Image: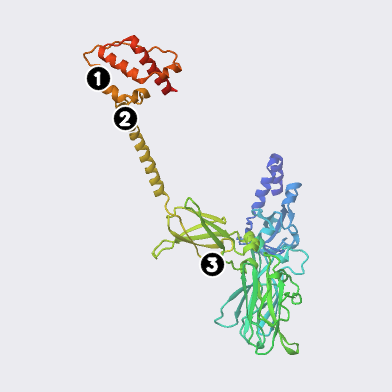
Amino acid sequence: SQRKRQSSLRLATPSLEPPLCYFLVGQTNLKSPQDIQVYVVNTNFTLRWKYTGNDTDVTFSAEYRWFEDFKVDGTEWKKLPGCQNDTRTECDFSSAITEYYDKHHLRIRTERREEVSPWSSIFEMTPYDIAQIGPPGIELQSINGVIKIKVSPPEANQVQKMWIDDLSFKYNLVIWENSSNAEFRSQSIFPTDKIYDLAPDTTYCLKVQATYPLESKEGLFSPVHCIKTTHKVNVTFCATNVSILALNMKFHLHWDNRYKQHVSYNVQYLSGYLKKLYDDYSVKWLNVPGCENITDTQCNFSSIITTVSGTFYLRVQAMIENNKSCLSNEVKVIPLVTNEIGPPGVKVDISDDVLLHIQIYPPGGSESEVMRDNYDFSYRILYWKNSSNNEEEIKMKEIKQTIGTISDLTPSTLYCVKVQAFSKAYNKSSHFSKEECIKTPGDKILPLVILATFVTAVVAVLLVAAPLIFVLYQAYSKIKYVFFPSCQPPLNIEGFGGQLFNSPYRPTAEEPIENFSIIETIITEDLNQIDFKDYKHSKQSSRDSGNYSNDDDTSGSKASEEMLEKEIV
């Protein structure tokens, strides 16, 4: 009867067939799985879910599709291998997933014979994003007081791998004494490494974790392994306290010698990248040039630092008679980290405008190009007044350039400067340079003020004195003109000045004076023979008569003209 009802419903409402079928199937009361999770470790995939129904005879089946199929050709859901008719609430479907960088969709439902529940919600995943790194493999060996460890990558000997580049793995070791009050110690190790600083005859337990820094992923720890240490053979001629002194990219290795007899040394080095390999690097150590079969306890190994971005390891091989040898502990060199920065060079100068100029020479001198290019130096300048006052403030200035300028200085003052180089990128700083002192010139403002005052005073004096001098000069000219005229009388008049002024013939104020004029005539040589007495006589006669006569005066006039002409000539 139920089949007849379904047939009639299909005929009546064919468009409602999918919902109707879904409704009828849902009448079974089977619940869908919930809280679906996928766990991925390396290439191992596990699907887990929860079922909240009370039914005990149910099974579960899952389907999947991956993004490229769904996007390109609309492929329908496929049965998920390993997850069909499973009675548990988890299943392994590792064989179904081969594309680790594509998106995948998963769904699961509950089944009981012919009855099925609705599909669960879709779980979306990209395998590589949710994958965890599996535990690495470990091999241990106890020898001469140390533990030698060999680590294999998490997917060693697997054809299908989630992690393609095994060399990108780094390994963290956790080790502790197998006792009730154990203290855990963590350290980074290489695939082949040694663990030092262990107590003899002591059982240690350890585990190792692989990390993938490129993706910021941390893997699962390996199972715990335990091993007992042995006694360390005490070899007295071994080099001890091996250390590195590095300044301005000049590298020196130093060590101590406790042996009283003759010992020779070979300094050996290993490029750091060889330790990242899973091969045995024990035969790949090389001797440092110039540090072979030496008796000194130091070695300059700057020649092997061929790159500042690499890592190097060094050790000292001590040798005595009978070909006995002993290897020291290894020391690690990261050139730009191990190196110490020396103080910079400094030169100071004062300019005319009272500015302190500081010329900085980067650490390392002329061969400091490598340091300048990698450390990206900045400079810290300290300057202060060098006076007896101990409370003088020390001022600081930071610059990037190698030339600095300091203003606002006090004239006629001794200033001292020292400079420190530092690198923010490497968190390193040098010692301060030697103090350089220089005295600022005297204050030039006062001489300028004095000069300006003098010039102003001179201009003011000139402005006031010029009119006064002009007035006095004009007054002087007038007085001189009136009382001391510049024109002089003819010589004939000057010669007789005394007689003329004392002459009784000088007219008086009451006496009328007739106007007369001198008639110029040609003077001949005969006039020179005129007797001057006749002139006096004529003049005397004229005084007697009291009046001038034209006739009598002719000869006198001529004589006067002759004298005047000579004077002029």
In the image, which is nearer the foreground, mark 1 or mark 2? 1
**Where's the C terminus, which quadrant?**
top left
**What separation in Å lies between label 1 and label 2 (alpha carbons)?**
37 Å
Crowd rating for badge 1 (residues with CA inside 10 Å; few <14, some 14–19, many 20+): few
Dots 1, 2 in contact, CB < 8 A: no
Q: Is residue 548 above or below residue 298?
A: above
Sequence-wise, the earlier of marks 2 and 3 is 3
Amino acid marked by disc 2: Tyr
- Residue 232 in which image quadrant: bottom right
In the image, which is nearer the foreground, mark 2 or mark 3? 2
- Residue 334 in which image quadrant: bottom right
Left or right, residue 464 beside residue 69: left
Residue bearing the label numbered 1:
504
The secondary structure type at the circle numbered 2 is: helix
Sequence-wise, the earlier of marks 3 and 1 is 3
Coloration mode: rainbow
Crowd rating for badge 3 (residues with CA inside 10 Å; few <14, some 14–19, many 20+): some
Amino acid marked by disc 3: His
